[in-house]
Amino acid sequence: MPSGRLELPLAISVGDPAGIGPEIIGKAWEARHASGLAPFFAIGDIGSFAPHWDGPVVRIENPADTFKHFDSALPVIQLHNCLSVVPGRPDLDGAHCAYQALEMAIGFARAGSAAALVTGPVSKSQLYAVGFTHPGQTEFIAERCGVAKNNAVMMLAGPDLRVVPMTTHIPLAEVAAKLDGRLIRQRLRATAKGLQRNFGIENPRLAVAGFNPHAGELGNMGREELEIFEPAIAQIRSEGFNVIGPLPADTMFHAEARAQYDAALCAYHDQALIPLKTLYFHDAVNITLGLPVVRTSPDHGTAFGIAGQNKALPYSMIAAIKMAESAALYRLAAADGG
């Protein structure tokens, strides 16, 4: 992480109040000193914390109030009074709260009132029922920031592995049709620039996983690598980017291989997320590249099945907060010419 501290707090949208969002945010606040966390405030229903977590909360009116309260209580901006919050039982009222909290958090980050945005886990099915029309929070944030959806890239990051799925939440049967040269080039450029902006890596090393077993075995197991991947990669290399591949995916993720690149770009969701979650299930972070604001989130869902039982682990939320601070500091350093 670059030196210095942020002058603005981090904004955290609570997510679905019936999920584990309130608990992991509260537990992250409890670990603020041990984990060296930058000051942050939550956005949602202040009453949603008590059913999940018994720590101190304080209502604030604006982000700047975070600093005078952060040492003694978790600052919360109240925007929605839920009729009731029952852990593990999502309802439409809670979905409205999650939707509004996300909208407000984006607004604070875009307006320069918050240094970065961290999003708590939401239930997509509940959001869809209250009018949410996007595949996920990433796409919604990109739209609100005026960024084309193909230019907002989802990266999942652990301590020594970063992965980018070039296609995300679509059926596996549709992946081959979505993988074209334009998409691959967009993902490679966005990933390289995102590593420079958010991680301070001057010359990012990118590795591309092939689509077929053994990366197609010279066309004997599929021709996507020869006809789509290789021309796209060649063009990106001609632009000065450091890219290798397409490589057999089954040999890309052991320790020695991971040391050879800064990010791996994978053809589809599970090709990227299985190795990451196998290695870093409890502390992986989702960071969106290509946005004018910094956005991270824990790499897990609402976990309704354990909500309210004091079983949720806050490590991914803590890692998301730390990564948001680090990315914001790297951006500030670049803006200052550092």
Image (spheres, helix red, strand yellow):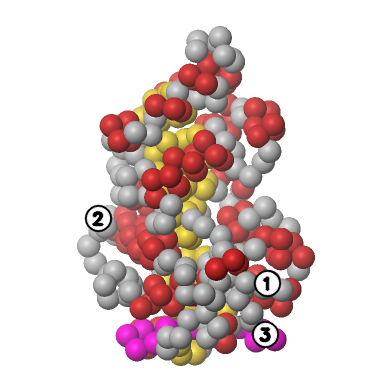
The C terminus lies in quadrant = bottom left
Give above or below for 31 relative to 325: below
**Depth-wise, is mark 3 or mark 2 nearer the camera?**
3
For the question of whether residue 113 can be seen, the reply is: no
Between 290 and 226, the residue placed more toward the observer is 226
Q: Is residue 198 left or right of residue 90?
A: left
Q: Position of residue 304 (x, y in %)?
A: 60, 67
The image position of residue 147, as x and y in percent, is: 58, 52
Q: Are marks 1 and 3 in contact (CB under 8 Å)?
A: no
Name above or below for residue 332 compared with residue 48.
above
Which residue position is annotated with label 1?
A: 90
Query: How far apart are labels 1 and 3 at the CA level?
Result: 10 Å
Q: Residue at x 32, y 57 (%)?
A: 330
Closer to us: 162 or 241: 162
Specify the quadrant of the image occupied by residue 127.
bottom right
- The residue lying at 56 percent from left, 9 percent from top is 220
Q: Amino acid at mark 1?
A: Pro
Q: Is residue 66 above or below residue 191?
A: below
Tell me the CA gap for discs 3 and 2. Answer: 49 Å
Which is nearer the eye, 246 or 194?
246
Q: Which residue is mark 3?
A: 84
* Image spot of residue 13 (x, y percent): 53, 71
Of the two numbered discs 1 and 3 on the same chain, state the one appearing first in sequence. 3
Query: Which residue range is magenta in the image?
Result: 70-83
Q: For residue 310, say whether it is visible.
A: yes
The CA span between labels 1 and 2 is 46 Å
Question: Circle 2 is placed at which residue position?
Answer: 338
Give the residue type that dot 3 points to.
Ser
Circle 1: is it few (<14), some (14-19), or many (20+) Cα within 10 Å? many
Q: Nearer the viewer, residue 171 or 197?
A: 171
